């Protein structure tokens, strides 16, 4: 089967998805979405940002690479040649993915655990033959510890590939020369350089790595390398510093007017994966957040995070919480003397929250 | 490329729902098997990521600290919650899951303001049930354990 035929098939799948999703939305009881947005009382954990109709978890089946490529570079370059370098967009023609988006259904959690075990203490049997022995052991250890601690606790950005799955909010800005994809969690921004080669003058890796890409009409193909050792999610397997990927991104307007962004991604990692694996991620337009007036702000994690790591005498990591007056406590809105130790402590107008704090002082 | 791949490409699945249910850290420090009530005056309501934070002063003058969900997770809830919902000095009743180690803090379950409005800024650290607590609070219970013990009698 040629890649072109595969893409045609993919297109058919997307059309079918539109149709199915439309049916689901049309038949959903009125108000069901609102109930979900309340934070999942009654057993389910609180949901992340919710909103908009039709937030079912219909996702396309992952499409593996058209050939068994040895490396992500081979895969990406094959696609680049196939599409003759792709489409050169202008500011007018570039696909616009404006608005606020939230992560929706995906297939990545089913890559390693039967039934898609997910998150802390993820239940389900590990799928053999996916991870290398060293990483399979590491994953077993992580599962045995119960994920009571997460590297993000101390405000490290999620990085890639976890960026694809983390909750909270995304904004996608596409220009002819770059795409900027922002997650408010950890101020974690991915930059995709269109029609360029990889560059690494830093001589190191980074949380999101180096991404290049090219457009094929409304579809963006992205190659990412030079990534920190991260993970797929809290409680999911770690990745190595050899982790790379090829992603195919596309916004799909559904028949009811709702929009989804679908991502078909193949992960390569010679240290952690026995062979490349492919997963699908989706993002849904979060209209409820947009209507609420929400705007993405800088995550003040460095001055507004009172959770921290503790390790017990058996080596089990867990999370702890600081209270006012305790060493290291971050005051979320007051005057933190650690910010400007070179200023008089009673200098007026230095509280981070003048709307309330200064008003209280005046009284 | 083999035919099964073509089929794969065309087939749609209802994937395991992974709708994002976790904060950026675990909630192991909070005891979500216990739910308790505290009444106090708002010292500070921090409506900011990565977590909303509520600090209140109780009748003895002790300052307590509570963690809630991040703004994007709660701003669209009903009733709406934003940075102006709780003001310094407001008297509130707060249902929470306390810290396991007994310090003066916990994870927010619900906040009830003087006018009787119930707000839900909870994250995964506390899963108090609103229907239960509406009854329990009206009956004067100050903890889930107390309410459940009374129900057994």
Image (spheres, rainbow, N blue to C red):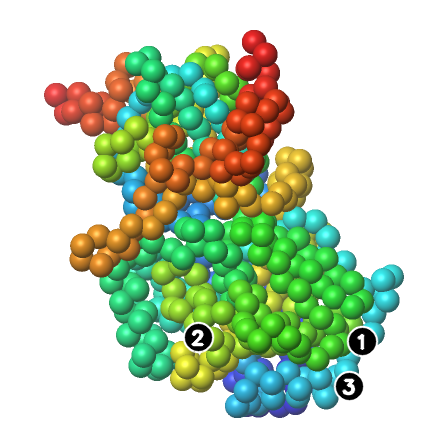
* Chain to which the residue tagged by mark 1 belongs: A
- Crowding near the residue tagged with mark 2, few <14, some 14–19, many ≥20 C-alpha atoms within 10 Å: some
- Crowding near the residue tagged with mark 1, few <14, some 14–19, many ≥20 C-alpha atoms within 10 Å: some
Instruction: Tell me the element at label 2.
Output: loop
Residue A41: which quarter of the image? top left
What is the distance, in whole Å, between disc 1 and disc 3 at their CAs?
Answer: 9 Å
Q: Earlier in the sequence, mark 3 or mark 2?
A: 3
Q: Earlier in the sequence, mark 1 or mark 2?
A: 1
Q: Which residue is mark 3?
A: A84
- At x 36% / y 23%, what residue is drawn? B63
Asked whether the viewer can see residue A37, the reply is no
Tell me if label 1 and label 2 are in contact, CB under 8 Å. Answer: no
Q: How many marks?
A: 3
Asked whether the viewer can see residue A209, the reply is yes
- At x 33% / y 20%, what residue is drawn? B62
Instruction: Tell me the element at label 1.
Output: loop
Q: From the image, which quarter does the N terminus of chain A lie in?
A: bottom right
Point out which mark residue A87 bears. 1
Instruction: Tell me the element at label 3.
Output: loop
Point out which mark residue A295 bears. none
A208 w.r.t. B21: above or below: below
* Chain to which the residue tagged by mark 2 belongs: A
What is the distance, in whole Å, between disc 3 and disc 2 at their CAs?
Answer: 32 Å
* Chain to which the residue tagged by mark 3 belongs: A
- At x 83% / y 74%, what residue is drawn? A88
Q: From the image, which quarter does the C terminus of chain A lie in?
A: top right
Residue B58 position in % (x across, y down)? 34, 17
Residue B14 position in % (x across, y down)? 49, 62
Q: Which residue is mark 2?
A: A240
- Crowding near the residue tagged with mark 3, few <14, some 14–19, many ≥20 C-alpha atoms within 10 Å: few
């Amino acid at each position: 089967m040629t890649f072109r035929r595969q893409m045609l098939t993919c297109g058919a799948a997307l059309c079918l998805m539109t149709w199915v999703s439309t049916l689901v939305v049309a038949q959903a009881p009125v108000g069901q979405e609102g109930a979900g947005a309340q934070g999942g009382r009654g057993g389910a954990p609180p949901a992340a940002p919710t909103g908009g109709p039709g937030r079912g978890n219909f996702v396309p089946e992952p499409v593996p690479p058209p050939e068994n490529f040895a490396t992500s570079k081979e895969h990406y370059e094959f696609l680049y040649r196939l599409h003759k370098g792709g489409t050169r967009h202008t500011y007018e023609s570039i696909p616009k993915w404006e608005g606020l988006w939230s992560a929706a259904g995906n297939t990545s959690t089913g890559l390693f655990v039967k039934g898609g075990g997910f998150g802390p203490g993820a239940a389900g049997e590990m799928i053999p033959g996916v991870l290398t022995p060293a990483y399979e052991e590491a994953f077993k250890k992580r599962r045995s510890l119960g994920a009571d601690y997460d590297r993000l606790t101390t405000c490290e950005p999620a990085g890639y590939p976890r960026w694809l799955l983390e909750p909270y909010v995304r904004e996608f800005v596409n220009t002819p020369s770059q795409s900027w994809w922002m997650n408010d969690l950890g101020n974690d921004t991915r930059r995709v350089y269109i029609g360029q080669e990889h560059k690494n003058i830093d001589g190191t890796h980074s949380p999101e790595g180096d991404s290049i890409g090219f457009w094929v009409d409304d579809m963006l193909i992205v190659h990412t390398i030079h990534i920190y050792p991260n993970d797929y999610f809290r409680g999911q397997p770690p990745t190595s510093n050899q982790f790379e990927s090829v992603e195919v991104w596309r916004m799909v307007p559904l028949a009811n007017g709702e929009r989804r962004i679908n991502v078909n991604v193949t992960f390569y990692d010679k240290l952690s994966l026995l062979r490349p694996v492919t997963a699908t991620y989706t993002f849904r337009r979060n209209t409820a957040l947009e209507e609420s007036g929400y705007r993405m702000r800088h995550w003040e994690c460095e001055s507004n995070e009172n959770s921290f790591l503790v390790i017990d005498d058996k080596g089990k990591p867990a999370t702890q919480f600081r209270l006012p007056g305790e060493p290291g406590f971050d005051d979320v809105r007051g005057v933190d003397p650690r910010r400007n130790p070179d200023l008089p402590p009673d200098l007026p107008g230095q509280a981070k929250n003048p709307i309330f704090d200064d008003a209280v002082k005046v009284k | 490329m083999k035919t099964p791949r073509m089929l794969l490409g065309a087939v749609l699945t209802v994937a395991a729902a992974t709708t994002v249910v976790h904060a950026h850290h675990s909630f192991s420090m909070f005891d979500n098997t216990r739910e308790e009530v505290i009444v106090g005056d708002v010292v500070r309501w921090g409506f900011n990521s990565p977590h909303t934070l509520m600090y209140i002063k109780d009748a003895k003058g002790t300052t307590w600290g509570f963690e809630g969900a991040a703004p994007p997770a709660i701003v669209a809830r009903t009733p709406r919650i934003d940075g102006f919902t709780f003001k310094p000095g407001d008297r509130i009743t707060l249902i929470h899951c306390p810290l396991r180690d007994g310090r003066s803090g916990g994870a927010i379950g619900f906040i009830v303001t003087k006018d009787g409005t119930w707000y839900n800024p909870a994250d995964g650290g506390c899963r108090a049930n609103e229907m239960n607590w509406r009854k329990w609070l009206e009956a004067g219970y100050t903890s889930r354990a107390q309410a459940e013990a009374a129900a057994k009698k």
